[in-house]
């Protein structure tokens, strides 16, 4: 059984070690530091922590100002407020002037759970991906999270990192090497490719286990780098497998599934793409696992989508 | 028509005390929900719903009803207890707060819960929505009044001040805001997070009448409602009631503690909390008014 760590916890820890290494790093939060885990940075480096109060829009533009004056600003709140409430500040004050603001948004997706649909961001990948100059990352585990949080300080310009509330399995060894714009292939196979991000990566691995029992070898790709997207990995998946399933804890519109479908058609590949995600609905209250089940974000539904996709490919 | 307008302040205080017991029970059962801000709003919600608001539980969509918007949507547990007790929906629903496929979502959902006037949960939206309702009343020539309950942390949001400017500019006299002024937000006391003092002066400078009240004393609140309505009528400006409260009110170890904003008690803490809350219920009506 893999160790379980929430990506927001890995974020909190990574910020502290980053803060120790670089004193140009400042962190902003909007009255959620105990939930986003920036409280750890606040404790370690109180002078470089900016508590903004409940004012997300103000926070993003303040982060932009800090960045314009030479800081690397990490701004955190829940994803629904970071990408949603403060969207236009992120667009015009962060992305347009290409500033070093690293928006690290926690509590993304359905697994927020009890708080309900008002707090479950299912559209943030789409909102952030559409912005010029923005880079978008959806880490699947604590190891990638730690890497991307530190890497974000080295990557020039705006970055969006999507983090979760729920503890998720650790998938990578601490010494695993990652690259911006390069997906990680966690399992090889040529019958179908499952391209996933966030907590759906571990579901995709489980789905691959289900499929193996039926003699189907699935390739499992962790597309933690949504933008820049790994076009080569997608083209290879299309060419080698001829069937692609995407899986994300996000709307099936405009997120990973949308990005992959765009890439497949742009590459002129004629392969079916089945998108697993939230089917154009808002979330609701419930326990995280119940919600994943209710919205069809399970290993079983990924495996079924793979079978459907293979059948479609054969019929083409 | 008010379904059952309670005049006796002792009785109102007792209803508020019972509300606290019910909220504690409900949140403990499901181990999720925001206690601090629910407990601090007990008297405010009680005086509004049992005395002030013109609503009909048997006809929740009655077009002439008064409207109430819970800007601080995380205090939903307290609102749900009131609505259930008034008969907007069966009390049985309280047991499935925040559970999958339930009526009572983590934050108020106007499409799922009878009696909920506006879906809230994202702080800062409520006052704007209340203004929209007040404008609609004016357009329709209706005489209902719109009330909005805001958190003091919620006042950090710029949108609140955009709304405040607009409401006074447009001379809305069918709108009253109440601030649950408990001086605590999520990460800590407002004094340490973002202190908005002087709050009364801010509202005044935005063109509002300000009425101060002891938010745990029903007499003080009732007087404040009366005064707010009268002064609004006289001045043509909307009023805001700064209701001074204590977050987590009624449970000694929760009072004033940010940790109990969203924290839920374990069995031992629950026992202690219930002991204190039921004791207060037995002492019904002794509100110790300071104003
Ligand atoms: C726009 C927005 N930002 C952040 C939150 C998260 N949040 C929920 S409650 C809360 C603190 C609210 O404090 P206050 O308004 O004082 O409420 P009360 O003390 O009455 O509970 C925060 C930051 C939110 N719900 N909405
Ligand atoms: Mg407060």
Image: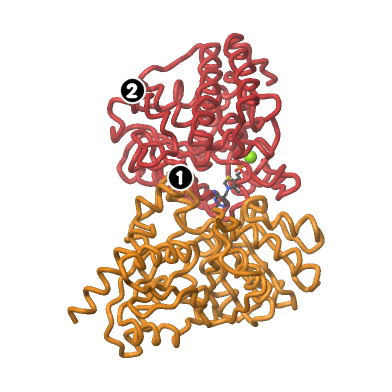
Chain colours: A orange, B red
Q: Nearer the viewer, residue B154 or A147?
A: A147
Residue A21 sits in which quadrant?
A: bottom right
Crowding at mark 2 (Cα within 10 Å: few <14, some 14-19, many 20+): few
User: What is the residue that sits farthest to the left in this orientation?
Assistant: A315
Q: Which residue is at a point 40% across and 52% down the rendered structure image? A: A283
Give the camera-side residue of B145 and A15: A15
Gap between marks 1 and 2 measured at Cα: 40 Å
Q: Which numbered marker is on residue B1?
A: 2
Determine the secondary structure under disc 1.
loop
The C terminus of chain A, quarter of image: bottom left
The residue sitting at the bottom extreme is: A268
Q: Residue A287: which numbered mark, if any? A: 1
- Label 2 lies in what chain? B
Q: Residue A260, position in %: x, y?
A: 38, 78
| Secondary element type, mark 2 | loop
Residue B193 horizontal/vertical position (percent): 72, 49
Q: Hey, which quadrant is residue B140 in on the image?
A: top left
Q: Position of residue A81 (x, y in %)?
A: 53, 58
Pair 1/2: label in front: 1
Whether residue B251 is situated above or below residue A21 in the rendered picture: above
- Taking depth in this image into account, of B290 and B249 the one nearest to the observer is B249
Vertical arrangement, residue A74 with respect to residue A261, above or below: above
């Amino acid at each position: 059984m893999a160790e379980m760590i929430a990506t927001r916890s890995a974020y909190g820890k990574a910020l502290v070690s980053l803060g120790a290494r670089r004193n140009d790093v400042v962190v902003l939060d909007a009255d959620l530091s105990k939930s986003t885990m920036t409280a750890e940075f606040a404790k370690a480096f109180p002078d470089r922590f900016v508590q903004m109060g409940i004012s997300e829009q103000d926070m993003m533009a303040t982060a932009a100002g800090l960045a314009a004056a030479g800081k690397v600003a990490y701004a955190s709140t829940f994803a629904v407020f970071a990408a949603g409430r403060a969207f236009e500040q992120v667009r015009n004050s962060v992305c347009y002037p290409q500033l070093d603001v690293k928006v690290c948004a926690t509590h993304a997706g359905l697994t927020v759970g009890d708080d309900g649909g008002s707090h479950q961001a299912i559209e943030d990948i789409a909102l952030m991906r559409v912005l010029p100059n923005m880079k978008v990352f959806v880490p699947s585990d604590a190891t990638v999270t730690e890497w991307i949080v530190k890497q974000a300080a080295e990557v020039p310009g705006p970055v969006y990192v999507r983090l979760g509330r729920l503890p998720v399995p650790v998938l990578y060894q601490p010494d695993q090497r990652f690259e911006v714009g390069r997906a990680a292939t966690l399992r090889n196979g040529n019958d179908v490719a499952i391209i996933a991000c966030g907590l759906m990566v571990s579901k995709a691995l489980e789905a691959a286990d289900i499929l193996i029992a039926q003699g189907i070898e699935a390739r499992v790709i962790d597309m933690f780098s949504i933008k820049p997207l790994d076009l080569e990995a997608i083209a290879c998946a299309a060419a080698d497998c001829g069937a692609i399933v995407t899986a994300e804890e996000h709307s099936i519109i405009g997120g990973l599934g949308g990005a992959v479908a765009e890439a497949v058609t742009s590459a002129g590949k004629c392969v079916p793409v089945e998108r697993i995600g939230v089917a154009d609905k808002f979330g609701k209250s419930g326990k995280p696992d119940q919600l994943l089940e209710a919205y069809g974000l399970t290993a079983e539904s990924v495996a079924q989508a793979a079978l459907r996709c293979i059948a479609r490919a054969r019929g083409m | 028509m008010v379904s059952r307008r309670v005049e006796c302040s002792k009785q109102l205080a007792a209803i508020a005390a019972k509300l606290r017991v019910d909220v504690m029970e409900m949140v403990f059962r499901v181990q999720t929900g925001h206690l601090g801000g629910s407990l601090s709003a007990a008297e405010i919600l009680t005086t509004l719903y049992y005395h002030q608001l013109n609503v009909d539980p048997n006809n929740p969509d009655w077009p002439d009803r008064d409207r109430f918007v819970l800007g601080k949507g995380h205090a939903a547990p307290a609102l749900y207890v009131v609505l259930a007790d008034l008969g907007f929906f069966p009390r049985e629903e309280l047991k499935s707060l925040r559970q999958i496929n339930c009526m009572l979502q983590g934050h108020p959902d106007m499409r799922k819960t009878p009696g909920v006037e506006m879906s809230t949960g994202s702080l800062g939206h409520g006052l704007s929505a209340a203004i929209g309702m007040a404008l609609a009343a004016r357009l329709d020539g209706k005489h209902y009044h719109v009330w909005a309950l805001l958190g003091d942390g919620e006042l950090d949001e710029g949108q609140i001040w955009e709304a405040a400017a607009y409401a006074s500019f447009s001379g809305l006299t069918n709108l009253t805001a109440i601030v649950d002024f408990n001086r605590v937000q999520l990460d800590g006391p407002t004094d340490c997070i973002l202190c908005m003092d002087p709050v009364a002066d801010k509202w005044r400078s935005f063109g509002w009448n300000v009425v101060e009240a002891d938010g745990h004393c029903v007499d003080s609140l009732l007087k404040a409602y009366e005064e707010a309505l009268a002064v609004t009528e006289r001045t043509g400006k909307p009023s805001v009631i700064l209701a001074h409260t204590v977050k987590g009110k009624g449970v000694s170890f929760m009072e004033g503690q940010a940790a109990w904003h969203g924290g839920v008690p374990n069995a031992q803490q629950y026992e202690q909390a219930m002991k204190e809350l039921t004791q207060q219920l037995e002492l019904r009506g002794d509100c110790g008014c300071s104003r």
